[in-house]
Image: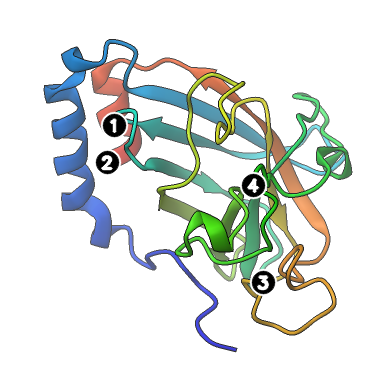
Amino acid sequence: MGQLVAFPRKKEDFALLTLKYLFFIFLINGQELSYPLYARVNVHLSDSKTSIGTLYFIQGQRSSPVIIRGNLAGLIPNTTYHGFHVHTSKVDDQRPNCTAANAHFNPFNRTHGAPVSTIDHRHAGDLGNIYADGSGKAAIFIADTIIRLNRPTGQRSILNRTIIVHKDIDDLGLGGQNDSLTTGHAGARLACGHIFSTTMTENQAFKTFLF
């Protein structure tokens, strides 16, 4: 089936790289006054008021990758990998019905693929898998070059859309199942949340994305 996991397994692998990235975007921030852009999502179990964590997003410049950082708890223990996608429609902030998020965010009408694929071979919302440990906890650190945090009308903008955590592993379109090329055969929707724009100070950004 090939490699199913398209994200670094250790946050330490990204620590120095992220420090350089944040230093760079703050150093040149005056060149584009609207950047960096920030977003966040409060993730809830489906049809529940129970929050399982918060994820934060940063885009340093117009063409910069979006970095996603945060921690989730309350996933199914010992299930390891969970499909992790942006879906098209916004869900309720307080008690989200994850099925209301509709299909994967796919503005270019492509088949499902891996986050390392080009935009011609993946949905914009295809973010691969996250790893949950034996206690159902997941530390998330993803850099993606396709999604954007610009105004909600932007073609690749994920603002006012929904993050979904699926029950099963995403096969990245390689599994040969009937739904591999549409959903990655990732199963039911465990948790989700509405992605909305936010602000941060420089100090808050360093603490959020580095520690």
Query: Is 111 in front, or is 134?
Result: 111
Q: Which three-letter amino acid code belongs to the residue tagged 2?
A: Leu
Query: In this view, which residue lies farthest toward the bottom?
Result: 1
Nearer-N-terminus badge (2/3): 3
Nearer-N-terminus badge (4/1): 4
Query: Is 119 in front, or is 133?
Result: 119
Q: Mark 2 near mark 3, Cβ–Cβ under 8 Å?
A: no
Marks 4 and 1 sit apart, C-alpha to C-alpha, by: 35 Å
Q: Mark number for residue 108?
A: 4
Q: Mark 4 near mark 1, Cβ–Cβ under 8 Å?
A: no
- Determine which residue is flagged by label 2: 210
Nearer-N-terminus badge (4/2): 4
Q: Which three-letter amino acid code belongs to the residue tagged 3?
A: Ile
- Determine which residue is flagged by label 3: 169
Position of residue 190 measured from the top left corner of the image (x, y, whole percent): 78, 53
- Determine which residue is flagged by label 1: 207
Marks 2 and 1 sit apart, C-alpha to C-alpha, by: 6 Å
Q: Mark 2 near mark 1, Cβ–Cβ under 8 Å?
A: yes
Q: Which three-letter amino acid code belongs to the residue tagged 1?
A: Lys
Query: Is 6 in front, or is 131?
Result: 6
Position of residue 130 measured from the top left corner of the image (x, y, whole percent): 55, 61
Marks 4 and 2 sit apart, C-alpha to C-alpha, by: 33 Å
Secondary structure at badge 4 equals loop
Is residue 211 at least partly visible in the picture? no
- What residue is drawn where x is 19% and y is 51%? 17
Question: Relative to 11, is 147 on the left or the right?
Answer: right
Q: Which three-letter amino acid code belongs to the residue tagged 4?
A: Phe
Q: Nearer the viewer, mark 4 or mark 2?
A: 4
Marks 4 and 3 sit apart, C-alpha to C-alpha, by: 24 Å
